[in-house]
Amino acid sequence: MMILHYLQYSRAFRILWALEELHLQNYQIRFYKRQPNLAAPEELKIVHPLGKSPVLQDGQQVLAESAVILEMLQQRYDQEGQFKPKPEDQEHAYQYLYWMHYAEGSLMPLLVFQLVMSNMPCHMPLLIRPIAKKVCNGVKTGFLQPRLKDHVLYIENYLARHDYFAGEFSFADIQMSFPLQALSKRVPLDIPNIRAFLSRIQQREAFQRAQEIDGHYQ
């Protein structure tokens, strides 16, 4: 029996979606609410020392990190090879590997940094809040926004030529979905190709089933 440890408003949705794509029935969900400061509850550290989500227990294995979990699920349960390009399809196999790592290795850190810079002034003492806001806005304007703009243009150009990130729909698209959804809400840029991609994946039956399950717990 698999157990998905599912933190409220987290990347765990990606794993739930993958489980539904695979039509797996033998899994349970244990839901965890965030604390008022948005941190994960201490109970998650009983499951994994870092107290992060998603965490998937499959038998005696306890797996963290979305890309690792998705890779394990694909290798173990995707018997027909629907969700990863075949090794002989070298170009798409490379793109699959690249985007699986790019999502959290390159794109997501910039989005998290931007969120931190936006929220930091609110947590400062009232007297220094205007200074903190000015500093944080300077970091966003001078450092974050130019880099994010480069990444957005890069992804937009790629999706102008591809419906999905690695040939046909694959787990690389699930991995990329979280940062692109965050980007579409937080970055005020024209991103028609990214929005079209998000619309495509949200039409999938497994995505919609996962949304229904997620809505039940939320």
Image (spheres, rainbow, N blue to C red):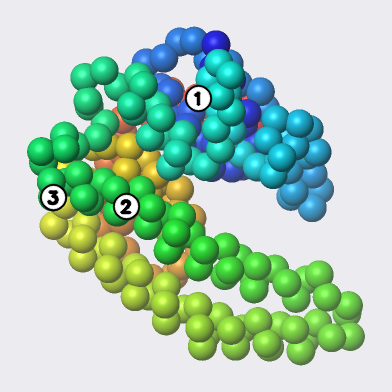
Q: Residues within 10 Å of mark 3 (few under 14, many from 20)?
A: few
| Residue 123 in the image, given as x and y percentages of width and height | 81, 70
**Can residue 199 be seen in the rendering of this structure?**
no
The mark that comes first in sequence, 1 or 3, is 3
- Residue at image mark 3: 91
Q: Residue furthest left?
A: 88
Q: Earlier in the sequence, mark 2 or mark 3?
A: 3
Give the CA separation, mark 1 to mark 3: 35 Å
Do the numbered discs 2 and 3 sit on residues whose CB atoms are within 8 Å? no
Q: Residue at x 26, y 63 (%)?
A: 156
**Marks 1 and 2 in Cβ contact (< 8 Å):** no
- Look at the image and tell me in which quarter the N terminus lies: top right
User: How far is the residue under mark 1 from the one under mark 2?
Assistant: 27 Å
Residue holding disc 2: 99
Q: Amino acid at mark 2?
A: Trp
Q: Is residue 47 left or right of residue 201?
A: right
Residue 10 sits above or below residue 111 on the image = above
Determine whether label 1 and label 3 are within 8 Å by CB. no
Residue behind mark 1: 212
Measured as percent of width and height from the top left, residue 91 is found at 13, 50
Nearest to viewer (mark 1 / mark 3)? 3
Tell which circle, 1 or 2, labels the residue nearer the N-terminal end: 2
